[in-house]
Image (tube, grey):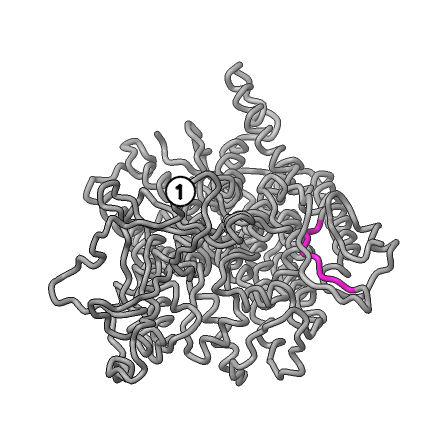
Amino acid sequence: MASPSSSVRHRGSKKNVDGPTSPPAAAPGVKSAENKPAVKKGEGQNESSSEWDYRLALVIVTIGAFATRFWKISYPDQVVFDEVHFGKDAVRLDRYPGASGDGVQFASLYIQGTYFFDVHPPFAKLLFALVGWLVGFDGKFLFENIGDSYTDNKVPYVALRALPAMLGSLTVPVVFLIMWESGYSLPACVLSAGLLLFDNAHIGEDRLILLDATLVISMALSVLCYIKFHKNRHQPFSRKWWKWMLMTGIALSCVISTKYVGVFTFVTIGSAVLIDLWGLLDVNRRQGKLSLFEFGTHFAARAFGLIIVPFFIYLFWFQVHFAILTKSGPGDDFMSPEFQASLSDNPMFAQSKGVEYYDVLTFRHKDTKVYLHSHPDRYPLRYDDGRVSSQGQQVPKGKADEEFRTRSSLFNLIHFPSKVAMWTHTNPLPDWGYKQAEINGNKNSKEPSNLWYAEDIPSLAPDSPRSNQEPRKVQPMRFLKKYLELQAAMFHHNNALTSSHPYASEPFQWPFLLRGVSFWTKNDTREQIYFLGNPVGWWLCSSLLAVFVGILGADQLALRRGIDALEEIWGPGTRHRLYNSTGFFFLCWAAHYFPFYLMGRQRFLHHYLPSHVASVLVTGALVEFIFNIDPASLSEDFVASKPGRGPLKVKHTRQSLLAIWAATIAILGATIWGFGFFAPLTYGTPGLDVAGINARKWLSYDLHFAK
């Protein structure tokens, strides 16, 4: 199988190339077109889009991105819904948006050095903590209630919001650069960047102290850096080759260090890398076959730059996390006694007492904090005597001379003959059980949810020497052991986020923008922030995703019948570019979207934001394809200036160029209208009357103040 490659034009390439500027997607049997050499600067200048046109457009979209993200960023000067939930419920694991903490409360806890638990890696939260520390935030305000005033509590919230706003603003020029580096025409670059520039969902998310701006820009940078790395594939092991591969690895580490859904970006880049490696194995490749040793060096280099380097950077952020959070805090209960012993001022060890024979103990469940007790009431039609039996087995069976203490010693209560562990859960009993927790059995006796501990010793005399013991010293714990324990807890609790939420949604709703999420309301002024994408842009992108699949399906059917419509109508190299360049963007969208169908946890509209970025790339590429812009990699009229910054020769009629510009202007005009129409819901101001609310209540948008 030949190495998959594309005929995407290269910006300022010095050598003949046969592959895509965008990394390849899976396109079996696709052959690359013959390439033509670049010529000297100056030829074809009248018909080409100059480099300065691209630069000017890049500056304009960047300024627009900063303007839309920073406009009235200080409003509202109150805690918004997401911010309080990302703070107050950081360790409750039962509310939107899924046991996640975000920058606000976590910045406070980082600054105070107080240990907390979150299901997301620490990178983005550490960025918020750094900003808070730089602007003098003392971390004392813990964002307890929605509507709490930032200004009254002297919180530098504008600086904290400025971080995601800046990252979100920079994502727009990154998207433009992805299209430019992939060799697309200026209107295609402007269209993709413009769809992101005027998207209400990205703007709304970027203006709040949330993690998604960091996630999205890291994903976009991963794609951009890999495209630049792929463009240097014919100079393997050169300085630029190593530079862009390592930059790709660093960007990938930022994605996975922000949220674990960043693994989908690894899937995207990894798929392209595997196809690239498969091509290197081909003994008939145009550049000459590689020996197995040479192939091994390519494989090892990519494994180092795209797996090992990101992994160690990922570990580094956890090391920083542990180094800062040295004090006992709200996250203690999620960790083992050994982990808690490594934190200063931990109450478990400060209040623990040694247990001796004949002590009367109270038992408590580790996860739910439910006490183990019995009472004379009975289950309906069950257990006539209403008692709990243990067959009289001695509970402790540990190591010889092992000290058993209250609070800090965890144990299982296992029925020996059946190997069933005593267990409880969060679902309360009905009224006949007084809404108390059910004590039941778990056949999987090794689950962490089976753990209990001795809470207290009621029979212990107040003047007993055991009541006045010296506090234990902090016990150090190896980094790797702490990391592995925290990872296990993060995955366990993330998968446990299955409770319902009124603003949760299903993945099939996201591309069609069927509903949004209410973030904040102010009753006296009828103002609200409603998290929602720009319907015009989202519906267009979703439609063109379907069109792309349809084109590929029709092309395959035509080829089966011996008809090569793509090459005959659009010219040589069209299929190769469509499958591999646009196909790579489509792969990026699919890899970030379809896995959510397999998740049992809570899902929300913001989970679609990375996929939406990929969809705007597909849209720009497909619009260029529809208007028949030349797909050849390098034409004789290509104008080469300096490496990486060459203007493009667009081989089509002036009418086609005018048509694509007209389409771009029309699409962006409609997108800007949609942005402005829903802007009051994005920025939270101005307030709308009933008629204004109802005019924006499309589909299932559950807006406030509609009556």
Residue 530 magenta = yes
Q: Is residue 584 toward the left or the right of residue 551 in the image?
A: left
Circle 1: residue type: Tyr
Return the residue nearer the eye: 346 or 392.
Answer: 392
- Tell me if residue 664 comes above or below residue 205 in the rendering: above
In the picture, the quarter occupied by the C terminus is bottom right
The magenta stretch is 527-534
In percent of width and height, residue 230 lies at 41, 48
In percent of width and height, residue 113 lies at 41, 78
Q: Is residue 452 visible?
A: yes
Return the residue nearer the eye: 114 or 626.
Answer: 114
Q: Is residue 630 toward the left or the right of residue 338 in the image?
A: right
Image quadrant of residue 174?
A: bottom right
Please tell me whether mark 1 sits on a helix, a strand or a loop.
Answer: loop
Residue at x-position 21% and y-position 40%: 291
Magenta stretch: helix, strand or loop mostly: strand
